[in-house]
Structure formats: C-alpha cells, structure tokens
Amino acid sequence: MLIALFNILIFPGFIFLTLFGWIAEYIDRKLCARLQNRMGPPWFQPFADFVKLVSKEEIIPEEANPTMFKLMPVLALTATVTAFFYIPLWGKSALFAFNGDLIVVLYLLTIPTLTYFLGGWYSTSLYSKIGAVRSLTQLFAYEVPLLLSILAPALLANTWSLSEMAAFYGTHHWYWLFNLLGFAISIIALLGKLEKVPFDIPEAETEIVAGTFTEYSGRLLGLFRLSIDIEAIVGSALLAAVFMPFGLGLPPVVGFALFILKVLFIICLLSILRTVFARLRIDQMMTFCWKYVSPFAFLQLLINLVLKGIIVK
Amino acid sequence: MGLIQKTVNWARLKSPWVLHFNTGACNACDIEIIAALTPRYDLERFGVVLKGTPRHADVLLCSGPVTKQIKCRLQRIYDQMPEPKFVVAVGTCSCSGGVFDGCYNVESGIDQAIPVSAYIPGCPASPKAIIDGVVKLLSSLETK
C-alpha cells in the first residue's frame, strides 16, 4: 500500500514527472532561444509560470459547461501520468507489465488530445472550437504513422508488451539499428502529438488566438501546460524504450542517468526541429503524413517482416 | 508574509505574460513593442512571453490615445483578463493623448478608460524604454 502510494505520487509518478517535465521545458525553451541567437529564459521559468498560473483568478465563461471545462485538464494530467507506469525505464521490466501494454500506452497518450478537443469544444468560444476541431483532424494525420512505426519493433520482438520488448532487445544487441527509419517517423509523429511547431496548427496564435486554450485561465491552464510537459516526457520515454533499448539492466544509478540522457536527447531533437521548421497548413500536414510518412512506416514494417523471416528464427 | 505568499509574489514578478493592444496608435509604438520582443532585446530573459488571448495575460500593453470607437472594446478586453492584472501605457499618446489631445474623437490617454499601473512616455517609446518601464513596474510591485 505504502509502496503503491510512493510509486503513484513520488517516483516514478507525479512529482518526478512534474520536475522532469519542467526541466525538459526549460531545456526546450533555452535551446530554442540559443538557436535563435538570444539569451532565453532563466532555469526556474517553468516553475515560476506554473506557480503564477495556479495563483491567478480562474474565469469560466458563462456559456461553457463548468463540469466538463474543469474536468478536462485533470483528465489530461491523469492519463499522461498513468501511461508512464507501463514504460520500462532502465530495467528490463516496467513497474506494471502485461501482454498488450504497448496498445494501452498509445491509447492513454491519445486521451490528452481528446481532452484538448472536448475542453475547447465546451468553452464554446469560436476560436477554441476551431482549435478543437483542428486538433482532432491532426490526430488522424499523425496517429497512424506513430502506431505503425512503434508496431514494427514490436513485430520483430514478437510481443505486444513493452517490458518483453526491452527483454528481447536486451538479449539481441544491435537489433535496434534495424528500426532507425521507424525512429525518424515516430519523431515526426511525436511532434504532431505534442503540437510543436511544424504541427502547432491547433494553437496557431497568429491565426486563432490560442486555439483550444483560448478561454482557459489560471489553475486550469496551469494543469493543461503541466500535462503537455509531462506528455513530452512520456512520449520521449516511450520512444527511448522502443527505439533505443541499449544499456538496459545496468546498475540503478548508471541506468537512471542513461535513461535521463536518452529522454533529453529526444527532447533536444524535438526542440531543434521545432526551431528549424515553420508551421504547415492543416491540409499540407494531412498530405505530408498520409502521402510520405505513412508509406515509410509501412516500409519499416515490411523490412521487419522480412528480417523476421531471415534472421530471427 | 508567509512562505507561500512570498513564492507567489516572486512567481508573479518572474513570469509576466503580456498582451499587446493597439488603442488607436499611429503604429509607431506598436512597431517598437514588437521590436522589444525580437531576439535583439529578448524579453524572454525576464520571463515575458507575448500571448494572443486576454485570458492568459497579466500585463496589457496599450499604445495610442483611446478613440471613442475602441473605448468599450478596451474595457471589455480589460474585464476579460484574470486578476491580478496590470496595464502599461506605451507612448506619449497613451499617457496623455499627446498630439491628439482635445480631438473630437479621442479620450486623453488610457487612464480615462481603465486604471493604469505604469506610464512609458516617448514618441515612439524606444524598446529600451519599454523594457525599463516593465522592469520598474515589476520592481515597484516587489515592495508591496
């Protein structure tokens, strides 16, 4: 009971994820600023932003549905934190594992997008409704390549469980090199999932004010921002577990450091991509994801099928 | 003052999000505000981020004398901002009406419509003056 509470609240649960999420947001903003040749925010910026938002007045629009409006940020936060329990960090097994947890993690990572949609829809502002519909439209573009690219390594390992995948790649060293194409695809899909710059169409602030979050203020906005930070960590940890399964089973401290480095590597990659590219239109994103990204995801699947026939008996 | 209140005050000073609103300016002050947000001056050093919606903003940067047409819109935007909120009047026109003072279609300054916390004169106010004004506003809040 006590251990379960510790797991949920402190490590690897809520407090660890919050702190790591803030550090990742700081690194993301600082790296972006340095690439744009400016100073960037101080190290405590995400913490200061959060405390300020939490202590601010909370306005609920008159037309909005107050229950749904208040529930959505909490639901987004819960879903992302829950998803983290099924991802193996440095050992060969996650905290909880069963056959099929890969699908559960992907499903739990879809819930935040749905809460953005519902939260925007129930704020009944025109801007948030447009943002909400865009975030759902975008879901159809990136979700298929993401699932396909994560399916390919699972196919090679012949399992639906993230922990068993970690065990497979732990015994078959260097097999992860076959999945590099899938890694690139899933990075693109993760950019879409986190609504970062080439795919920040739902909250395009030069077009539709702040998109889904236009009507959110104070504590609720703080929770939404926190859940986005944690989603970045969980998404990166998922990619690290699936596509970089080396150095697993090291002693705890070294393994923990390696895990942090892997996640930060992916965060930095996302940050560089978001600085380099400019925003696409929603139809351009659809075309790009269905015409170019999905076929390459299928190619990765095909490569792994052939490999499975030849090498892995 | 308790520790929580101290932390909250500190956080408010370190993360002022601004909303930029043109209340009938000739556009010169707006260009200077945008210049203050560019990488050359980099207001993100102080935690300042430009936001698109009044719901997210703490500081309302207004430029220009308030025209009769925009007065009710300005008051509505001010009401849409969550507490605590501050208003900064950028440029001579928004401080006192400037050259437009006494015109039939303008009020004389932002403070005729909504309460103002800081005045930054200048025609147009330079980015350095704007940054100085915002920093002075924040440091005056620190003592309260």
Image (cartoon, helix red, strand yellow):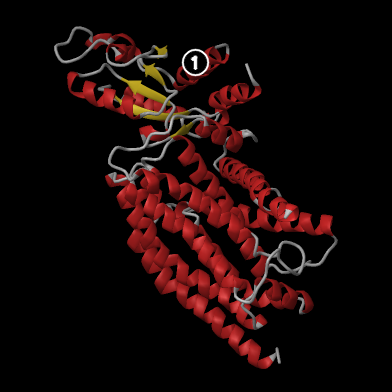
- At 44% across and 57% down in the image, what residue appears? A113
Measuring 56% from the left and 56% from the top, which residue is drawn there? Answer: A80
Compared with residue A12, is residue A242 higher up or lower down, i.e. above or below?
Answer: below
- Does residue A274 appear anywhere in the picture? yes
> Where residue B74 appears, x then y in whole percent?
27, 24
Q: Residue at x 65, y 83 (%)?
A: A158
Q: Is residue B71 above or below residue A293?
A: above
Task: Describe residue B131's horizontal placement relative to residue A214 as left or right.
Answer: right
Closer to the camera in the image, A162 or A197: A162
Q: Quadrant of the N terminus of chain A?
A: bottom right
Pick the front one: A204 or A16: A16
Asked whether, in this view, residue A126 is left or right of residue A31, the answer is: left
Badge 1: few (under 14), some or many (20 or more) residues near its Cα, within 10 Å? some
In-image side of A251 versus A309 (left or right) = right
Q: Residue at x 70, y 58 (%)?
A: A262
Asked whether A75 or A153 is in front, the reply is: A75
- Report the front residue among B112 and A13: A13
Q: Quadrant of residue A181?
A: bottom right
